[in-house]
Amino acid sequence: MLGQDDLLQSSNVDQLATKITAIARGALEKYCPRSRSSPYAKRWWSAELTVLRESYTSPRNAARSLLRAKGYPDAEAERRAVAAKHIFHHSIRQVRKQHWEDFLDDVQNVWKATKYLNPQDRSSFSRIPMLVDGERMVQDKAEIADKLIAAFFPAPPVPESNGTEGPRQYQEESEALHEEEIRRALFSSHPRKAPGLDLLPNVVWRELWPVLHTQFHHLFSLLLSKGKIPEAWKVAKIVPLRKGEGRDHTKAANYRPISLLSYLGKTLGLVIAERISS
């Protein structure tokens, strides 16, 4: 059915890429729903919280017993129960926050952390407390992001004039793209690396390859023939990583960027890189 639909007749690369992504996401939601972790699997739970839970449940149960016995709430018992409840839940929030911050402070956890973050609504730079700009300390998150982006992607040098007007044109006949080239590129990457903004890891595309290989080939052939990349593939989440322990991490130069890009876009890059190298 998929091989006979309008995907193979479409010549709009943005529309084609969007439809293929929608097919993958629909199949993932239908056949591989997100698992729900057990409410008892709390890595942040501690012995102190167990004690606080007992100190909360005791006055709560006492207040409920008085309510059943009297038929109306006992003011003093309710006050003690509410006070214990506030202390217990406040402690839970504090412990969870501290556990998450300690987890993110370990640079080895950067890829694991992306499984718990939504790339569309979280700042990649929120774990950097400050940067030094000359004699000034930069603490605003937006300004920190601007400083890191400027360090990661400096302005390209101005090209030297070759004495001719306009860019030089190269017209070479390229060999037709084969499905095997796409398959090699797709299966050369690790299947479970962090996904891009589409939230589709490489393992999804690898599993869909036997079904959508014709659509992949049609899309990639269009991209190479038209020299155009879908707009969705041009947007990535940039995660700054520390270059090494012992460096001054208040300087933007001591971070390096990791790009969380759509895996189809990465696959296209691998196909082109293999052609250039060969």
Image: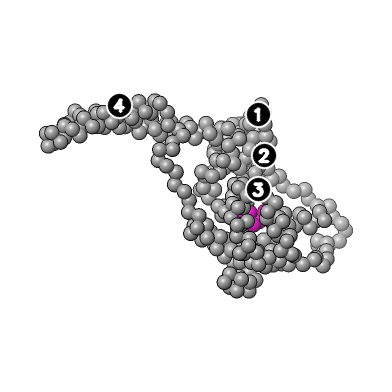
Query: Residue flagged by tag 1: what amino acid is it?
Result: Glu
Q: Residues in magenta?
A: 262-266
Give percent across and percent down for residue 46.
42, 28
Q: Which of the two residues, 235 or 160, is positioned nearer the viewer here?
A: 235
N-terminal-most mark, 4 or 2: 4
Give percent across and percent down for residue 40.
40, 38
Give percent across and percent down for residue 272.
75, 57
Give percent across and percent down for residue 3.
61, 71
Is 265 magenta? The answer is yes
Q: Secondary structure at mark 1?
A: loop
Tell me the residue that label 1 is attached to.
Answer: 245
Identity of the residue drawn at 16% across and 35% down: 67
| Residue 241 higher or lower than 268, as above or below | above
Tell me the residue that label 4 is attached to.
Answer: 55
Tell me the residue that label 3 is attached to.
Answer: 190
Q: Which of the two residues, 253 or 222, is positioned nearer the viewer here?
A: 222
Coloring applied to the structure: one colour
